[in-house]
Image (spheres, rainbow, N blue to C red):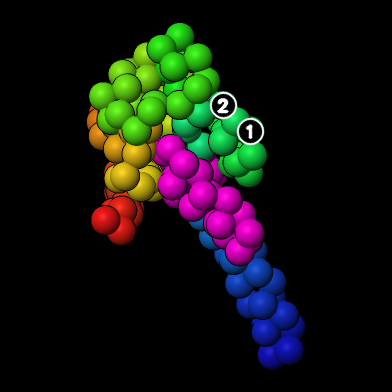
Amino acid sequence: MVEFQAKEVKSIDNIDAELQQILAQQSTRIKVVGAGGGGNNTINRMAEVGIKGVQTVAVNTDAQDLLYTTAEKKILLGKTLTKGLGAGADPKVGEEAARESEAEIKMALDNSDMVFITCGLGGGTGTGSAPVIAQIARKMGALTVAVVTLPFS
């Protein structure tokens, strides 16, 4: 009877190892995109508190702001349009910058199961680029969620 129990435990261990291997292959690939200054601040805060299991992507038209972001992947939106100087609080500039950088955004979102987009709706980059990023993510088949903040006034 002792021998039977030992074989049973070994069998359970093998099943557990197999289940862990299957689950590892099926893990959900989650990306969090911080758009503009507000979104980049959210990415920085996520890094500070040590959130694991997601890939962070920062997108911005302001090269200096992007430089200090702690995201794993960074995309300067609209290099030709804004020359890294920001969107000037104009959502149309943010939208056009995202459209100019569509190929880079697609590469960053490749193989995503879920995409969370975070931004503030008070400036130009986040307000203008977030809908473009959401459209791209959705067309790529990812479950897409936006978490946005509104300005105080």
Give the CA separation, mark 1 to mark 2: 6 Å
Residue 63 position within the rendered picture, expressed as x and y whole percent measured from the top left: 56, 26
Find residue 63 and name its label: 2
Q: Quadrant of residue 81?
A: top left
Amino acid carrying mark 2 in the image:
Ala
Q: Is residue 86 visible?
A: yes
Residue at the disc numbered 1: 67
Element on which disc 1 rests: helix
Location of residue 14 (image quadrant): bottom right
Residue 56 in the magenta stretch? The answer is yes
State the residue at coordinates (57%, 33%). Answer: 66
Left or right placement of residue 60 versus residue 127 in this view:
right
The x and y percentages for residue 137 are 32, 33
Q: Is residue 20 above or below residue 145?
A: below
Instruction: Look at 60% across and 30% down and name the residue there.
Output: 64
Residue 92 x/y as whole percent: 26, 24
Badge 1 vs badge 2, beta-carbon distance below 8 Å: yes
Amino acid found under the numbered disc labelled 1: Leu
Which residue, as the protein is rendered here, is positioned at the far front? Answer: 153
Number of residues whose C-alpha sits closer than 10 Å to that of mark 2, classed few (under 14), some (14–19) or many (20 or more):
some
